[in-house]
Amino acid sequence: MIETILQKEQLSHADLCTLLATKDRRDMDALFAAAYQTKLKYVGNKVYYRGLIEFSNVCTKDCYYCGIRSSNTNVLSFNMSEDEIVEAAIWTWKNRYGSVTLQSGEREDADFTDFVERLILRINEETNNELGITLCIGEQEREVYERWFAAGSHRYLLRIETTNPELFAKIHPQDGNHNFERRLACIKTLQEVGFQVGTGVMIGLPGQTIEDLANDIMFFKAHNIDMIGMGPYIVSSDTPMGQEVLAAGGNSAKAKRERFLLGLKMVAVTRLYLKDVNIAATTALQALNPVGREKGLQAGANILMPIVTTEGYRENYQLYDEKPCVEDTADECKDCLAARVTSVGDEIGFGERGDSPHFFDR
Ligand code: 5AD
C-alpha cells in the first residue's frame, strides 16, 4: 500500500496519516528512500550549516515542556556578553559556515531589542556582510521585527509548536502570555516584514495524534513556510510535562524509540509534501539516537545546526534532558559533524548561505 502512495503526485491528508503511522521496517525504509530522492531532486545533496549561538537562557515564558521555563529555579541563568557573541559569530564566519543562528529565551523589553539590534549591526560589520543571520528569539511586536530586519538579519525561526490550538493550550499556561493566535500572527508578520520564515513543531507530545501531525505538515504548506525545524519531544525532568510523562512510564526505551522514528517520519513526509524547503536535522534527533542527525539527513533533511555557543554556557542551555554536544567545543562539533555528513554521501555547502529555494519561488 505504501508504494502506491509514494508514487502519487499529490498526497492527501489520509495519505500523510498512513505514511506517518507506518511501523513496518521495510515501509519506513521505502519512505525514507523516497524522501531522500525528493531532496536530491529539489535541493540537492548539499548540507548547509547554521552555527547556533544560544546566547541567553533568560526567558519570560513558562512553557510546560521546556527546561529553561521561567519557573525552573534549578538552572543558573546566563547571558553571553556582546563581545562573546560577536566572537562566536566571527568563528562561524571564519570556518565558512553559511550562517549563524542567534537563539535565546524570549524577552520583549527595550534593552533586549536594542541589544539584538546592536549585535546584528556588529556581526555584519565584522564579517563584511558575508554571514547569513538568522534569529530565533520568539514573539515580538512588528516594529521590533522591522528594526531587526533593517539592521541586516534575514531569516527568523518561530516554531508554532503544534498547530492544534487545543493541544497548544494544554502545553502552555493559560495566563495571557502564551497564546496560539499571537504566535500565528507573529509568523505572518515576519513574512510581511520580509524574513525567510521557519517554523516547526514538537513530535510525540502527550495527547498529540497522527492526524495532528498530518495537519502540521499541511499547515507548513498552506502558510508558505520556507524552513522547517522540528524534532521529537524529549523529557525535561525539571518541568511539569516531563514529570507527568515520567510518572506515567512514558519515557521507556520503547517510547523514546517511537518518538525518534516518528520524528524521522515527519522529516520524510514533510520533504515529500513540501519538496523545495530547507529542513533541519535537529539536535533533538541526536538526543534520542547517537546517529539521529545522519538518519535525519537520510530521511530528507538538508540543514544542520552545529552548536557554537561558548563552552561553559552550554550546560545551562538545556531545553530537555540528555542534550548532546554539551561537553564539546565549536571545533569538536565541526569535525564530528563533517564525518557524519560524509558518512551518508552528502556534501557540506561551505561558504554558501544556502537559502531556501522556496523563498525565491513564493
Ligand atoms: N523537547 C523537545 N523540544 C523542545 N523545545 C523546548 N523544549 C523541548 C523539549 N522538552 C523546543 C521548542 C522550541 C525550541 C527552541 O525548542 O520547540 O521552540
Image (cartoon, rainbow, N blue to C red):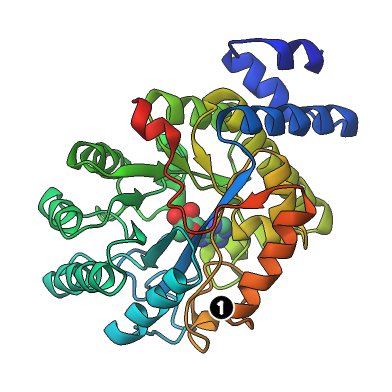
| Residue 343 higher or lower than 236, as above or below | above
The quadrant in which the C terminus is found is top left
Depth check: give the residue in front, 183 or 83.
83
Q: Position of residue 186 (x, y in %)?
A: 25, 44
- Label 1 CB less than 8 angstroms from ligand 1: no
Residue at the image point whose x is 24% and y is 39% from the top: 185
Look at label 1 and name its amino acid. Answer: Ala
Q: Is residue 313 in sight in this rendering?
A: yes
Depth check: give the residue in front, 187 or 339.
339
| Residue 322 higher or lower than 173, as above or below | below
Regarding mark 1 in the picture, which secondary structure is present there? helix
* Side of 339 where 73 appears, left or right: left
Name the residue that disc number 1 marks.
Answer: 330
* Side of 166 where 180 appears, left or right: left
Q: Is residue 65 in sight in this rendering?
A: no
Please tell me in which quadrant of the rendered image residue 241 appears.
Answer: bottom right
* Side of 129 where 131 appears, left or right: right
Q: Position of residue 341 (x, y in %)?
A: 70, 55
| Residue 58 higher or lower than 9, as above or below | below
Q: Position of residue 193 (x, y in %)?
A: 18, 42
Badge 1 density bin: few <14, some 14–19, many ≥20, Cα 10 Å: many
| Residue 176 higher or lower than 361, as above or below | below
Depth check: give the residue in front, 42 or 1.
42
**Number of numbered discs:** 1
The quadrant in which the N terminus is found is top right
Q: Position of residue 49 (x, y in %)?
A: 53, 58
Residue at the image point whose x is 66% and y is 51% from the top: 347
Residue at the image point whose x is 62% and y is 58% from the top: 284
